[in-house]
Image (cartoon, coloured by chain):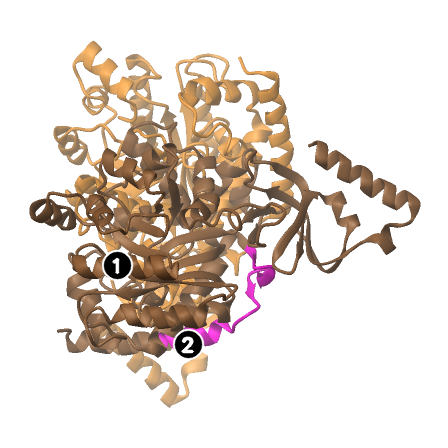
Chain colours: A orange, B brown
């Protein structure tokens, strides 16, 4: 607050002396007259605030008066709209938009439908267009960073750069031939090549994605751990998601999945563990000690009736918990806003206590929590000077946003993806007033419909 | 299908003979080139279909070619968009939009916050403007019938008619003085007057709303039952919602709430019982025998950590189950689309079975189920000739709607309230392309913000 007063005083001084114009440093983008929800350590909210952006970074945050200190290339008057840090989708498979809505409400889809479809149909083109469509949906819904696992991850990277979204992108590694690697475990070599290609990219962080404890053998999981350490690559993995995963490891090794991964050297700060539904209290303690990131996918986990991950306990105990959508065959939508209400309400139901998981904590998980799960909190997750300029503007005139007694309540219990008006990533306006500025969305939809017709024909002809 | 072929043949014949123009009967509204989800008994879907509307009723439904048989005042080309029966919100308190988002995530809000706020602040003006705002949100989100319980219900009726939404509107009756009735149980006389005023209104059905089994005594509940029978008025009531409601009746009368209401003559086809969370198997059998309507409010029930009502069992056993939002202090939003995903997923979680509550059943509950809960299935709930013209058009170009393998899956797992483009009620276009045609929404929002400032001041000054 003292800083804000000083800045206001500076503005008045500059105005009074007539020096303002000449002294104002140039910046790229100003967002002003916004209800700025900073998500900084003190959870500062500035009711008539401004965010100053230069190149890819936030330069200053304060009351609207600070705009007088700068000369901007472009100014967005938010007219009182809510400005929030961009949301981080910590677990997804964007390209699977091509299969969205296929075979919902049927058992064992992974082995009966998803794997055969992927085997029959996945190629570079499908992965690229599916990812484009998925990333468009994310940007339209306020996601500014996507953590993705799939095949041909270089195509996913190409799609992310085309759309303009930040990506932590993991090439899948499995114990059977995959669409992009004819030999079992071929994904490891593919991933290394991908990582070399995208090293130092400002938007893309390449990663290794060993599918799950049950779909790679111990030797190859060790190789993944070694490659991750040597090349400093994040590891994205499904962990403790399946009851048979837990049962098999208990029977064969008398270990939990978390203990098993620890024994192989995978449990460390480079790991983002998706799901963690079936983790014990001692697993949680171990995950915390090893500083692992957690991707909590509430919607996907309950749609598949797997259960409620103890994300509330993990969050309360200080673990690095972010929110994820999982792929669009699992959760159907890719925006994080659609997760918020579920996270708040299903944990209340699960604990039989309406006071747990308050709205502010859910918004925290969607923004700072996601950044922490990636160990990227120095750069992402809040609106503060020095951080990367990833932020979103929400429509405060939406009927369900009126009246606005508590902005966190509004975001968690009343907002939807179409309430996002404008999305800024790495300082670039990617969507403005719901119009994507980087890509022709109608062309992508048309491509998706073509691909869907091919898929429908394949399903009609019978999968094997 | 045979009917459709015959209609197409008729069209061709009319065209060939050149008689089409002169023979075509005039109608008010045609919606064409729509993906019509009829929700009729056979769940017919017409991929390039048309709906013909005259006055307040649907005249015909068929392939787009049938439009050649009519001359229309107004034609809406849906360009492939989804047309669905309007959704029925079977339990709400629309005027409480003024309090939305106030004191979320805190215990015992009903007694500590809601009742004192209502006592201090509720007047005709607040009820009217709150209801206007709530009904705007409903129409924008695809609700065409609202089942409401509150005070000054004649003001709610006035707001419903202004917005153009269909309403079953119940005046609240309680054992303490209320904002519109200084004497305990004054609501009963108020309700009778209201019922006289609105009898035979095409949009409004007046109703009695005894608040709950625990907030009226047995004598007055009997009087309500008698008035309902004599005046043929629906009864709207919170039933088996609270654990202490159940415990007290068990202790004092050794009855369940359902058994208790049956003993008082309230359990019959005129009753719409909201919540029914704590009902036994024999309660369910009794509710079925008595042909009671059920309003299932999943989002509100889990946000308050009360539990999951056995709506799956009730639906599967053929009871009349519709969906409700509850008031905006409970569930925060008033559109039924926002309930669909929760209903599908939380029942799967609750049963630990991903196959239960498939999407088609959830859409059924939101439309036909709602109509059945009101015993209005002859008029509402599906798109069929002869029924009232309550229907909605959804934006099929929404990113999350592409590709469209299964329209029910898309509606339940991917749609949100802002995907509704156009809402037609009683044959009247109330919203078109997201613009409300009946009311100035900005004026209503401004009024709501004024009221919110008054509420905020009252809360800041301390409630008692």
Q: Magenta includes A433?
A: no
Residue B88 in picture, x, y percent from top left = 45, 52
> Where on the picture, by quarter, is residue B445?
bottom left
Instruction: Residue under label 1, please give it.
Output: A40
Which of the pair A183/B410 is nearer the observer? B410
Query: Relative to A286, does residue B410 appear above or below in the rendering?
Result: below
The quarter of the image holding the N terminus of chain B is: top right
Instruction: Residue under label 2, please give it.
Output: B446
Q: Is residue B308 left or right of residue A98?
A: left
Chain ID of residue with mark 1: A
Dot in front, 1 or 2: 2
Which class describes the residues within 10 Å of circle 2: few (<14), some (14-19), or many (20+)?
few
Residue B211 in picture, x, y percent from top left = 25, 60
Residue range corresponding to the magenta coloring: B421-450
> Where on the picture, by quarter, is residue B198?
bottom left
Q: Secondary structure at mark 2?
A: helix
Q: Is residue B175 left or right of residue B43?
A: left
Q: Is residue A57 left or right of residue B424?
A: left
In the image, what residue occupies the spot 18% across and 22% down? A259
Q: Secondary structure at mark 1?
A: loop
């Amino acid at each position: 607050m003292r800083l804000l007063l000083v800045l206001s005083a500076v503005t008045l001084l500059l105005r009074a002396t007539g020096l303002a114009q000449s002294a104002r440093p140039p910046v790229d983008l100003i967002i002003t007259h916004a209800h700025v929800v900073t998500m900084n350590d003190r959870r500062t909210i500035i009711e008539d605030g401004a965010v100053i952006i230069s190149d890819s970074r936030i330069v200053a945050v304060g009351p609207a008066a600070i705009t007088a200190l700068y000369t901007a290339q472009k100014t967005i008057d938010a007219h009182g709209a809510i400005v929030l840090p961009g949301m981080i989708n910590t677990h997804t498979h964007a390209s699977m938009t091509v299969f969205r809505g296929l075979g919902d409400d049927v058992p064992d889809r992974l082995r009966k439908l998803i794997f055969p479809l992927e085997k029959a149909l996945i190629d570079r083109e499908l992965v690229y267009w599916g990812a484009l469509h998925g990333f468009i949906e994310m940007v339209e819904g306020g996601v500014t960073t996507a953590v993705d696992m799939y095949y041909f991850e270089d195509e996913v990277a190409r799609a992310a750069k085309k759309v303009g979204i930040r990506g932590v992108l993991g090439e899948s590694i499995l114990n059977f031939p995959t669409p992009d690697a004819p030999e079992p475990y071929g994904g490891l070599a593919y991933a290394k090549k991908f990582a070399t290609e995208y090293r130092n990219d400002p938007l893309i962080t390449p990663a290794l994605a060993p599918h799950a404890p049950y779909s790679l053998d111990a030797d190859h999981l060790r190789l993944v751990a070694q490659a991750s350490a040597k090349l400093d690559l994040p590891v994205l993995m499904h962990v403790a998601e399946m009851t048979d995963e837990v049962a098999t490891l208990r029977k064969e090794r008398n270990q939990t999945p978390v203990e098993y991964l620890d024994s192989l050297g995978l449990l460390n700060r480079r790991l983002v563990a998706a799901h963690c539904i079936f983790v014990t209290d001692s697993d949680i303690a171990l995950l915390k000690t090893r500083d692992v990131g957690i991707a909590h996918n509430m919607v996907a986990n309950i749609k598949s009736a797997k259960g409620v991950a103890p994300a509330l306990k993990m969050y309360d105990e200080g673990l690095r918990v972010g929110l994820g959508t999982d792929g669009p065959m699992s959760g159907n939508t890719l925006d994080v806003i659609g997760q918020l209400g579920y996270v708040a309400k299903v944990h209340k139901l699960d604990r039989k206590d309406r006071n747990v998981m308050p709205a502010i904590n859910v918004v925290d998980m969607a923004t700072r929590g996601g950044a922490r799960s990636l160990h990227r909190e120095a750069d992402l997750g809040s609106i503060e000077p020095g951080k990367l300029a990833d932020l979103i503007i929400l429509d405060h005139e939406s009927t369900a946003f009126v009246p606005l007694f508590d902005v966190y309540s509004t975001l968690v219990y009343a907002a939807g993806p179409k309430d996002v008006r404008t999305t800024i990533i790495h300082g670039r306006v990617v969507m403005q007033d719901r119009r994507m500025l980087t890509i022709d969305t109608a062309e992508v939809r048309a491509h998706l419909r073509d691909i869907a017709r091919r898929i429908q024909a394949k399903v009609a002809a019978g999968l094997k």
